[in-house]
Amino acid sequence: MPRQRPSWKLVLALLSILLAGLVWTAGLQESFDRPSVNPALSLKQKEIALLAEPAIPHPLKEILVGFDPQGSLRDSLRDIPIEELDDRQRLLLASVEPLKSDRRNILSEPFVSSKFELFREGLISGFSSENTSIDFSQAFDPIKEDALLARLTCLAAGFDNDSCLDFDSSKNMAIRLGITQFFPAIAVLLGSLLLIRQAWMLVRKSILPWPSLTEFSLDWIDMVLLVAGGFVVLGEVTIPSLVAPLIVFLAKGLADPIGQALKVVFGYFVMTVPPLLILRQQLKSLKRDEPPLGGWLQWRIFPLNSAIASAINGWLMILPPVLLVSWWMSRLLGDQGGSNPLLEIVLNSKDPLAILLLVFTTVILAPLFEETIFRGVLLPVLGNSIGKIWAIILSALVFALAHLSVGELVPLFVLGLGLACVRLSSGRLFPCVLMHAFWNGITFTNLLILGGY
């Protein structure tokens, strides 16, 4: 039976709901103005495809790079306003444009960096290997680390394909392309088969019943204070605002991306403090009750092999629905923007320390904290009060809203459904943490591969 709550807690809970609603509404509206990482990801994929093309066996070219990878890259670059293209992107676009007049128009604006001036001059004047006063091999020096730009500008300058080809770079990109194409395809296939098997078992009623939920003597007021008050009002707004000057001071003098990465780590860490302190106090209040086997949160790390198996199965089965709704939303509504800023940092970062800090945040800190709140406490409390099905739906919705991203709202909701099902079917929290870590870690790895780290 729920305990009698003092009236001040009810007032505080209602105030928390109101403030959290305002914060989430403002956050979701603000996410419309945040750029989406999807165009940058798509552009990176097309660059990799074009660079990898010479090293891909002919029977696989159409599957991996399409009919015209150069034209595909050109179309994507043309879709970006000229004034938003950086120096490198302007050179890429000028290199793949067939007409010299178009090249001149693209490169007519002064470059911010002098690093590419020789290439700009060569592309405008149209120098070639037969007739030029510019030594292309010397001009190659400033950008020889950029294999795609070097190859395309070399071809546009009139040199033959063999002279411009860096086969080692093409081979390396072909391997990356294979990883980013084949691994998801195999995972989607396996996940689809597992979903079909699960549906068949459901029809045949051969699925084992889910374990009983933890009986918390906590109620909706406790959950509102934890999620709306602790997570949203204090964790996402109040405490970060108070410690922002300290975070800026700690990152002062550090060049990006290390400075950005430190801000992400400290910012996320301080966000976790208020809800975890509130949760600690709530669990202490349960001392009068007998804790269940495995503790209130039901971590149950061991046996480890079954936890890993549950996490992998859950990840595989939720991958096809998440990708499907992502594709459907993009077709229906287009790119809604609002990507997590962390994705952009990962995509463009090449500093090992920054990468390590971001890995710690996304693969360790975030799964531990978010699963503790959403599947460790919120889901069982809701399940005992409104039933398991509605608890799965409502906890997944709160999980998605908490990320304050319109563009990722529906995919995160589906991911939350999968995580909740793993929690209820296994009767353990640890497999959810592992599944969440797998999801973030594989997304992180894919960004690193596309970013060329």
Image (tube, grey):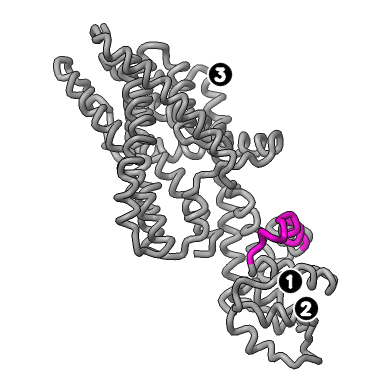
Viewer-side label of 2, 3:
2
Mark 1 — residue? 107
Alpha-carbon span between mark 1 and mark 2:
7 Å
Q: Position of residue 100 (x, y in %)?
A: 83, 74
Up/down of 103 relative to 311, above or below: below
Residue 108 seen from this side: yes
- The type of residue carrying mark 1 is Leu
Viewer-side label of 1, 3:
1
Alpha-carbon span between mark 2 and mark 3:
67 Å
Up/down of 227 relative to 368, above or below: above
Q: Main secondary structure of the magenta part?
A: helix
Up/down of 53 relative to 400, above or below: below
Residue segment shown in magenta: 71-86
Q: Position of residue 258 (x, y in %)?
A: 39, 61
Count of numbered marks:
3
Mark 3 — residue? 203
Q: Quadrant of residue 196?
A: top right
Q: Secondary structure at mark 1?
A: loop
